[in-house]
Image (cartoon, grey):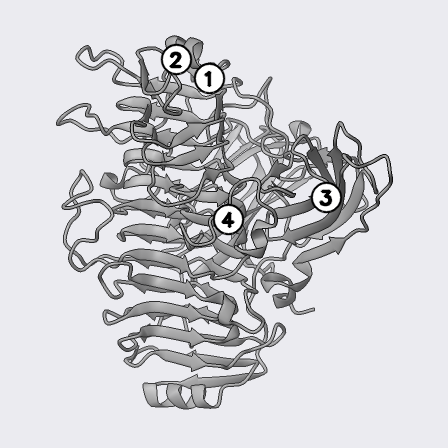
Amino acid sequence: MNYLLHNLRKINHSVVFLAMIFSSNCLLSSNISEVKTYGNFETAGIIIKVDGMNFNESAQIEYKKAGTGLFKPGHDFVRYDGNHLATSLFKLELNTTYDLRITLNDPDGVTGTNPMTIKVTTKPEFSIPVPLRIVNVSNQTELDEAITNLQAGDEIRLAAGTYVNGIHVFNISGTIFNPIVFTSQNITKPIIQGNTDNGIGIEAGAYFIFNNLEVHNESGAGVFFRGCHDMVITNCYIHDNQPGDYTANISIQHGEEGTPPLAGNFLIMNNVISDEIHDPVEENQGPGEPNTNVPGQSYFGIDCRYTPGPFITIRNNLIYGVVDGIHPCADEGGSPVMGPDELDVLNSWVDRELDIYNNVIYDCKDDDIELDGHMVNGRVFDNRLGKCENTISVAPIYPGPVFVVRNYMSGFHQGCIKQNTGVEGISRGVIFYHNTAMEKPRTIPAHCGSENCLYRGEPALQQNFVYKNNIFYARGRVYNGDMYSGGYHRYDTLDYNINYSTKEAESANPYIYKWVSYDLDPLNNSRYETMDGFRIATGQEQHGVWGDPKLNTSLYGNFPSGMYLYTMTIDSSSVGIDRGVLINGINNDFLGSAPDIGAYETSITGKDENIDTRKTPIKAVHTCPNPFSDAVLINVVVEAGIELKVDIQDLLGNNIKTLFEGKSTSNEMKFNWNCGEQRISSGIYLLRIVAGNENRIEKLVLSR
C-alpha cells in the first residue's frame, strides 16, 4: 500500500453518527450522537457531540493497542462549546490501530450506548512514494515546460542552480496515491527565487510534495499555498524572503477555495526556515515595538490565515530570525465571535487537530509560537523555544482545548505565555502541563517591571486555563497581571508547579505575584511577596513548590549562546523530583513515587503503554540536539553489563552506522554520531537500541 494514503489523510480521520434515543423520562439525560477521530503520527484527537448537554456532563477515554492488553486511561474530555467535548492522546506508535472506549457521565442520566468503543489508526512515518514519471530539468525553461505538462505522479527533479522565476502551478493536482513531487537531483539544494508574488506558488492544487529545495525570494513570499489541501514541505531551506509587515516564508491561505473546500492536511517537517539578513534586534526586543519587523526582516516563519483548513502538522523544523516563528491558527477576532456555550463552533471555524512538536525556534522579535486564532484540539509539545518577546502567545485563542505539554522555554523578554489582547473573543481551554520556563537573565537593570514568567494583561477576556506540573523560573515576578479597564481572567487553575524567582531578595519592589481576576473582585490587582501569601489569598498552588529547580544551563546543541537555548534538565537535588501530580494520558510513564515537575522526567520511559516499562532494561534515551545539523549526542540509561547494540538506520531499515555492540560498561552510555563529513542527506533517521529483550526506536532529524 502506498504510505501516502496514511501520511496525508483519508482513513486517519473518521466520523461516526449515532441515533439519538428519546423517551418520556429522559428529558434531562444526554447521549453521544457523533464521534470524530483523527490519527496523526504520534497523537490522536477525539471529538464527541453530546445531545441534551446542560453542562454537568463529563466524559473519559481509555485506549489500548487493538486486540491487546488492558485499557489505559487517557486525558479526560474537555468541553469546548455548547454541545461538544474533545481530548487528545499522546505518545502513540506509528502506523498502529488503537481501541478507544469512551464513557459519558451525566447525573441526569445517559441514553444510548455507553461506554462506546471505536478505533483510531496513526500514520506511518512519511515517505515519498515511487513516481509514475521522472522529469529531470536543469534550467528555468525546462522547469516551465515540465510544469506546463504536469500530471499526477510526476517527480520533477531539479539540477543544482538558480531558478529565477520559481515554481508556479494553478488548478493542477496530484492524487493521494500519485502526488506531484518537486525535488533535487542530488543532495545539493537547487535555489528557487521566484517573482514578485512568491518563489513557490500553488493555487487550487492538492497532493504536492516539495523536498530538498532552497527558497529565497526577496520580492515575495517564499512558499505560498492558496485554496490547497494535502501539501507537504520537507527537507527545505526557506529563508530571507520578502521583508515587511506580515510577510511570510511559508504562507497557507483560503482553504475554502479548494476542491473539496477546507480539507486541510498540511505537513511541514524537517525544514530550516529563517531570516538571517536584517538589521539587528536589541536585547530588549527593539528597536521599536516587538511586533514590528526591523528593516530587511520577513515577518512570519510559517503563517496560516483566512481559514487554511484543519489537520496541520509542523514538526522537526528549525525556525529563527523572524518576528513570529509559527502562526498556525488563523483569523483571530474574525466574525462570528463564538462564546463558550454556543453550539457547533466547528461549523463556523473549521480549524482543528493541530500538531506542533519537536521544533527548535529562537531569535524571534515577537513570539516563537503565536497561537492567536481558532483551534479545537491543538497539541504543542516537545519544542525548544529560545530568545523572543514571548515563547507562546494565546491572545486570544478559542475554543480549545489546546494542550501545551513538555516544552522547554527560555530567553523570553515578557512572558512564557502571553495572555493580553484587545481582539474580540474569550480565550479559553489552554492546558499547560509539564513545561519548563526560564526567563532570560539581565544585568542592567537586574530586574524590571516587564519581567514575568506568566503574563496576563489587559484588555482581555480569558477563562479556564490550567497550569500543572510546570517549572516557572522568573527573574522578576513569577506571575504578573494588569486588569484596570475591564475584561477578566477567571476560573484558572494553578497547582503542582515549581515557583521560583531570583528577585526575592530585592527590597525596593519585592512583589513576586500580582494577581488579576475581574473588576469587582477585591483580589484583583493584589500583590504578594511570598508563595504562601499568594496561596492563602487566592487558593491557587495548594500543592505548589517554592524553590530553585536546579536547572542545567549548559547550552543546548550548537546554537548561538545569545539565544538562551539551554539543556534545562534538572539536578538530582531539585525540589521538583517526584513532586508532580499524575495526569492520565500525559505522564502515566513516570518513574519514582510521583512524576517530576517540568518538561524533563529524570527517568522517563518509552512509549509503549502496554508494557510495564519500569522493569525494562532501557531506562531513558536522550538526544541533543535533535534536530541537528552535523552531530548529535546520544545518552542511553541502561542496566550495566547487559548486551547492548546501538545502530543508526534510515527509514527503510538500512544500517547507516553501528555506534556500539557489546556489553554495557556502565548505567549511562554516551555516544556521538557525527555525520558532518558523510554524504548523508537531510531527513529522518532511526536510532535503534537493543538491550536484552527490549528494542527501542527513537527518531533523529538531520537538517542541513
Tell whether 518 sits left or right of 292. Answer: right
Look at the picture and state if 478 lies above or below 390: above
Nearer-N-terminus badge (3/2): 3
Whole-angstrom CA distance, mark 2 to mark 4, is 32 Å
Nearer-N-terminus badge (1/3): 3
The quadrant of the picture occupied by the N terminus is: bottom right
Residue position marked by numbered label 3 in the rendering: 51
Question: Is there a contact, CB below 8 Å, between mark 2 and mark 1?
Answer: yes
Residue position marked by numbered label 1 in the rendering: 540
Whole-angstrom CA distance, mark 4 to mark 3, is 22 Å
Q: Which mark is residue 375?
A: 4
Whole-angstrom CA distance, mark 3 to mark 2, is 41 Å
Look at the picture and state if 697 lies above or below 201: above
Q: In which quarter of the image is residue 23?
A: top right
Tell whether 603 sits left or right of 161. Answer: right
Nearer-N-terminus badge (1/4): 4
Question: Is there a contact, CB below 8 Å, between mark 2 and mark 4?
Answer: no
Residue position marked by numbered label 2 in the rendering: 534
The quadrant of the picture occupied by the C terminus is: bottom left
Q: Disc 4 marks which amino acid?
A: Met
Whole-angstrom CA distance, mark 2 to mark 1, is 7 Å
Looking at this rendering, what residue extends furthest in the front direction?
24
Nearer-N-terminus badge (2/1): 2
Percent from the top left, x then y, of residue 89? 62, 42
